[in-house]
Image (tube, helix red, strand yellow):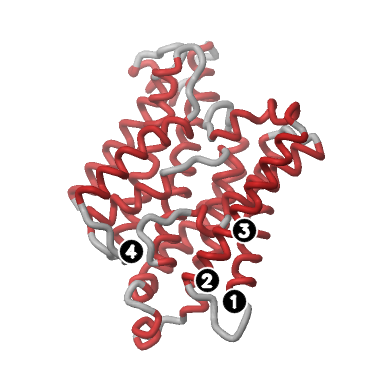
Amino acid sequence: MLGLAIALAVLVLALLLSLVVGTRAIPADEAWRYLWVNDGGESAYIVREMRLPRALLGLVVGCALGVAGALIQALTRNPLADTGILGVGAGASFAIAIGVGFLGITSIHQYLWLSFGGAVLVTVLVYVLGSAGPRQATPIRLTLVGVALGAVLGGFSGTIALLRPENFEKMRGWGVGSLAGRGWDVLAAVSPFILIGIVIAVGCAGALNAVALGDDLARSLGANLAVVRILVIIAVTLLAGAATGATGPIGFVGLMIPHAARWIVGPDQRWILAYTIVCAPILLVGADIIGRIMGGPIELEAGIVTAFVGAPVLILLARKRKLSGL
């Protein structure tokens, strides 16, 4: 509990720091005052209409990516898996590539719905193909189908980009993963999906502890594996689809944070989810802050920073502890 309380305090500090840091620095006491009082000035507008929704979006998207990664790792019994293993991110990106490349779509709100639709369709397809044949959908079959579909869709997305590069100039910020430019409307659009996904994830945590013991033992403990897998896939679709649509593909959050949480608290999915919900936003909001500081007048996107920060940390974790299954 102490570790969780410390992580929560760090998260609050990161959110407050996100209101202060930027191209125009605003003193902390003023930023705090503007949260409650709108004097109509430029600084108040920056805090209330630009940085506050950006920070809160980092909070909810960080939660979504982290929890989605934790669910995939538990479902596949692979502590280094993430949402890409089921092709969810590739499906979302492919749908947006189609919309931008052939329909001329550039609005972030349209990105959101295209992303969600692509994630849903690919997730359903993965489960249908993984369930084909006499045997049920096993983690290894879902993994193989997801990786294959993700590779194919990624190739198609790249082809579309080469065919219609002029349209993709308009979505470069989305393509590398960014919190910049997102307002209250985007936050309001994605939050319900993410909240529902997190509720489903928390409800499945106990059953995922049984799944971690193996299919046969899980059945003997009363777990309905088919129902658990369907619920997990629904949750991952909601979380990853909404997050990808809002900010673009951001890597390492869903891969590194659940693994680090498991290293701290052990294999209990209830505690892993609790730490992930708190710690994943710290990484994403922190990456966004670092991007503002390092980029100068031109900010570095959060997705670029998470790649630089996440890779060495993940290597360090892997070296310190021998990786094992769940």
Viewer-proximal residue among 273 and 310 = 310
Residues at badges 4 and 3 in contact (C-beta under 8 Å)?
no
Contact check, label 2 and label 3, Cβ < 8 Å: no
Which of marks 3 and 2 precedes in the sequence? 2
On screen, residue 177 above or below 132: above
Residue in the image at 50% along x and 54% along y = 83
Residue 269 % position (x, y): 33, 64
The nearer-to-camera label among 1 and 3 is 3
Q: What percent of the width, then of the height, locates residue 114?
A: 70, 47
Amino acid carrying label 1: it is Ser
* Residue ID at (43%, 61%): 71
Closer to the eye: label 1 or 2 = 2
Q: Which residue is mark 2?
A: 141
Secondary structure of the residue carrying numbered label 3 = helix
Q: Residues within 10 Å of mark 4 (few under 14, many from 20)?
A: many
Q: Please tell me whether residue 148 is drawn above or below residue 23 in the rendered image.
A: below
Which numbered tag is attached to residue 149? 3
Q: Are marks 4 and 1 in contact (CB under 8 Å)?
A: no
- Give the spatial CA distance, label 2 vs label 4: 22 Å
N-term-proximal mark, 1 vs 2: 1
For disc 2, the neighbor class at 10 Å (few under 14, some 14 to 19, many from 20) is some
Identify the amino acid type marked 4: Gln
